[in-house]
Image (cartoon, grey):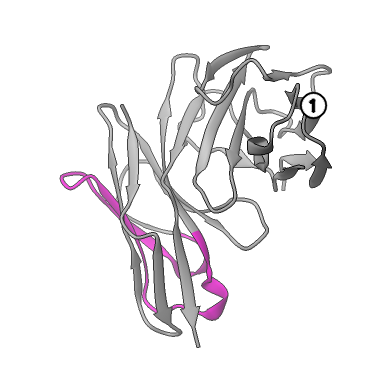
Amino acid sequence: EPEVTQTPSHQVTQMGQEVILRCVPISNHLYFYWYRQILGQKVEFLVSFYNNEISEKSEIFDDQFSVERPDGSNFTLKIRSTKLEDSAMYFCASSERGANTGELFFGEGSRLTVL
Amino acid sequence: AQSVTQLDSQVPVFEEAPVELRCNYSSSVSVYLFWYVQYPNQGLQLLLKYLSGSTLVKGINGFEAEFNKSQTSFHLRKPSVHISDTAEYFCAVSLLWGAGGFKTIFGAGTRLFVKA
């Protein structure tokens, strides 16, 4: 069964460092998303991406964050200068074009710990 | 604006007892409704979904949910829980946006704790 894969599963970084989280969405999906879950809190929408551009972003997704699809398969989330409050589980998701299911397919998540 | 409210942050229950996890949503447009489960240190797994049709939907692991349009609710139920059902459960609504993709909004989650 096709699945969304994310790397790394866990990353520890120093405050102020740049971090790139990688995702490989399901191959025939065209919509891509990043969500964040701070420990013990709700899953929060960060950004959606379609046709090589951001289609929507939340207020959390400030100038420190960026996304790109560099090679047609990977979908990356970059945090330019990490802060302590960026520590969270980051989930990538994808969905099919035009599917009347509303279902997002999630990866296992990348846990980011900022020290 | 769309929102999802899970009325209970924690639900402790004894093994083999029935359970109901409550979810209410608000939306000015049609939405799709979901329940996701998150086991400790794992990602999000789809439990069940309501798209249209029968208001009672069945999911994996013996869970079911009922869509009530008039009450804008989508409560999750299981007649007899197991220890292995201990997890965080998220109710979510998904709405279609212009280019054909979906935006999914999650509730705050309900931690189901099953005791022996």
Rendered location of residue A10, percent (x, y): 79, 47
Q: Please tell me whether residue A86 is drawn above or below residue B115 in the rendered image.
A: above
* Chain containing the residue with disc 1: A
Rendered location of residue A91, percent (x, y): 65, 40
Which residue is at the front of the view, A27 or B34?
Answer: B34
Element marked by disc 1: loop
Residue at figure coordinates x 18%, y 48% from the top left? B71
Rendered location of residue A81, percent (x, y): 75, 24
Residue at figure coordinates x 35%, y 34% from the top left? B31
* Residue A85 as seen in the image, left or right of residue B91: right
Q: Which residues are magenta?
A: B59-88
Residue at figure coordinates x 67%, y 59% from the top left? B41
Instruction: Give the number of callouts.
Output: 1
Disc 1: which residue: A74
| Res A105 quadrant in image | top right
Q: Please tell me whether residue B61 is drawn above or below residue B51 in the rendered image.
A: below
Query: In this orientation, does residue B55 appear?
Result: no
* Residue B14 as seen in the image, left or right of residue A89: left
**Farthest-out residue, bottom:** B116
- Decide whether residue A64 is among the magenta residues: no
- Decide whether residue B60 is among the magenta residues: yes
